[in-house]
Image (cartoon, rainbow, N blue to C red):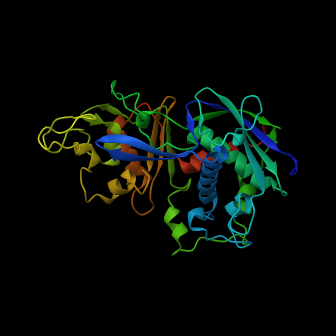
Amino acid sequence: MTSAKGERTYQLKALTDLWTGSVTLEEKNGQIKEKTESDHPITTGLLGSIRWWFEVLVRGLNDNACDPTVTICKDRKHCVVCELFGCTGWARKFRFEVLDENGGTKADQIKQNQIKQNQTFSLRFTPLRPIRPEEWTLLDATLHLIAEYGAIGGKTVFKPTDEPSRMRETHHQDYGIVEILKVDPPITNLNVAEVKKYVREERWRKPESKAKDADLAWASLKCFWFVGGKTLTRENTSASSFNKVLGRKESKACRDCGQVHNPPNKCPETKRHPKRESEHLVNRNDEISKWLAGSQQESKKVFSFKNPARTFGFVEPGLITFEAMRQRLTDAWGQNGWDFLKGDKVIDQLFAGKGDRS
């Protein structure tokens, strides 16, 4: 086991571009525009994403993870996630640095918000206080969860397209896929039983049934699913496997005239930018589709990438089951040529390779 006093460095390769600033999409004059914030260090975006996936893992093991945006954890009364990552009155246990291929820190480049495809970089974790073996194991499993099943950073909600005229549009690009090349020093992890025992200790603050952090119950490996090698995409102006799965209408036709108008073209009848059929649900009363599709204030629950191909998402307990989600994917892809992996199997695979990792 690596000493709690020693730093750990993960060398990664960006298989797509990585965006580490914040980004939202706005429609202005019929065109999709990005609203980005690039005035914080590159470490902020990446560490926030790592923490989010750490919470997903912990909820999958025992549910005991808060939602840091509502800051319910405080001082010594905190959850197992805040024990490592910090909260109000409780400092983070480690210093986090993003290093370029030459070992230089990107944290010094305040305006640097993007790591380019095929670039090699490293994440370095240096203990500021003793870090338990269970915490190192959880952190290691989180980084492998991101690399093998998820994505990191911003813009990961963008969706692919096969339309030749639209492929280069920013909101159709892949972001956030990485590969772990090396871990230094090599790590000997604990097994899943030892980690579960730690996250289930009575000292951790438990989510309250009426608390806001209970709203994130779906953000858990208990609700996670993954399909490798498959992509949900827009095939053409009238067909979108992504929209089919979300429960949105597939056609991009204008609701007023029935024609397709790509930005910046306006509808000839209304002289306004078009309201597309694809922006609306097939059944506006379908609560499952509403939840999967999200809104401007709430993320979609399905994420898909074209190169390398992977699709993952979440189900909502009491709303949509794994079988119902699998059926939506089957309607889009057919029955053959892909495997539907549930979160419990992901946990098994993350901890199946316990032992030395280098």
Q: Quadrant of the C terminus?
A: top right
Task: Tell me residue 42's x, y (percent).
Answer: 64, 43
Is 248 on the left-hand or right-hand side of 325?
A: left
User: Vertically, is 182 above or below 249?
Assistant: above
Task: Tell me residue 202's x, y (percent).
Answer: 72, 72
Is 119 on the left-hand or right-hand side of 358?
A: left
Q: Is residue 191 visible?
A: no
Residue found 71% across the figure and 61% down from its top: 86
Question: What is the total number of numbered labels drawn onto the structure image?
Answer: 0
Is 170 on the left-hand or right-hand side of 205?
A: left
Residue nearest the viewer, comparing 151 with 262: 262
Q: Is residue 257 visible?
A: yes
Task: Tell me residue 68's x, y (percent).
Answer: 60, 63
Dividing the picture into quadrants, the one containing residue 161 is top left
Residue nearest the viewer, comparing 207 with 73: 73
Residue found 71% across the figure and 73% down from its top: 77
User: Vertically, is 328 above or below 86?
Assistant: above
Is 306 on the left-hand or right-hand side of 358?
A: left
Task: Tell me residue 180's x, y (percent).
Answer: 68, 34
Residue found 51% across the figure and 75% down from its top: 210
Dividing the picture into quadrants, the one containing residue 284 is bottom left
